[in-house]
Amino acid sequence: MPANQQPAAEPGPPPHGRDQVQRTLADLRERGQRSARARAWRLRLYGLLTVQAGIAASIAWFVAYHFLDDPSPIVAPTTAVGIVAASMGSRLRRTIELLAGVTLGLAVGDLLMPFFGIGPWQTGVVVILAITVAVLLKGGGSLITQAGGTAVLIATLEPPVHELSVPRFVDAAVGGLVGLAVGLLLVPIHPKRTLLRLAEPVVNSSATALHSLSAALRIRDLGEAERSLGTLRSLTSQINALNEGLSAAEEVVRLAPLRWRERDSLAFHADSIRHLERSIHSARSLTRRLTTALKDDEPIPEEFPAAVDLLGAAWVTLR
């Protein structure tokens, strides 16, 4: 090879391959950012609940150990954490259901275990009967779960002696009251802040879906319109969480003295949430009808894309 001749450069990946790699990397970065934002949102939303659960468990353990003479408090802190952290719904109702479930599980266990003894099939029978009674009483999920769980506790952790079950009910009552006091009196949630955080994914996703629908209408992209409709349909779980948060917020402003001053402003937020639900229902109907129009190749007025864009901007204003 002549001295002044450079070796031929090795061929690189074709342009199409490089574009595909870049798109894949960009997609991975976007997914990572979305995941990080979602985790940060959940931490902001449930951060206070974790603090409430820790405080409630500590207080319930202290009370059961020092005032109920329970050498190894288990039921009281467990019940307290269950009241605080089980969900964002009505804690007062869940406390009543939980204590009713504990009573039911204790009663079934006390009645049957002296006759059946302790063992695997005996545990199964006691749980089936406890849950059956809870279902016949039309109990909610907390009552059914607690009845079955307490029946397991009675059937496996203690001998079939009636006197040993009474302290467990007292422990559960103390734990429930402590959890309720911490969640509603000592460290109550901030009603408006909680609702705004729960509404954030609903409003953001709805606005994004409407803007995407507007873009799809301009170029008659059926696939993008169907994705927008799918996004709006997928908001059911977020709307349910928002309604549970509203129930919790209304309970807090009703029972927590620290939040009584929030009653008037919370009523305004509650009214806004009702309008939000109606608007999402209407947006789903609109998107479904426009998607059908694209699928059937129907004419769509030129003003529609701009109108849908304006509707998406209104969602942001609502937020």
Image (cartoon, helix red, strand yellow):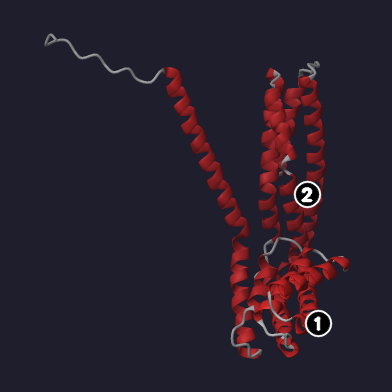
Q: Which mark's residue is nearer the viewer, 2 or 1? A: 1
x and y, in percent, of residue 110 in the image:
77, 83
Disc number at residue 170? Answer: none
Nearer to the camera, 9 or 110:
110
Q: Quadrant of the N terminus?
A: top left
Residue 63 in the image: above or below residue 308: below
176 relative position to 41: left or right: right
User: Looking at the image, which residue is at 59% across and 56% down?
Assistant: 44
Residue shown at the point (66%, 52%) measured from the top left: 197
User: Picture coordinates of residue 293 (x, y %)?
Assistant: 80, 21
Disc 2 is placed on an element classified as helix
Seen from the viewer's position, the closer of residues 11 and 195 is 11
| Residue 283, x across and y down, in percent | 78, 35
Q: Quadrant of residue 89?
A: bottom right
**Which quarter of the rendering shows the C terminus?**
top right
Which residue sits at x=61%, y=89%?
66
The residue labelled by disc 1 is 111
Q: Which residue is mark 2?
A: 273
How far across and down, in percent of the image, does residue 100 sit? 80, 74
Q: Are marks 2 and 1 in contact (CB under 8 Å)?
A: no
Q: Nearer the viewer, residue 181 or 125?
A: 125
Give the vertical position of 147 relative to 68 (above or below). above
Query: Tag 2: Cα neighbours inside 10 Å, few (<14), some, or many (≥20)?
Result: some
Q: Residue at x 61, y 87 (%)?
A: 65
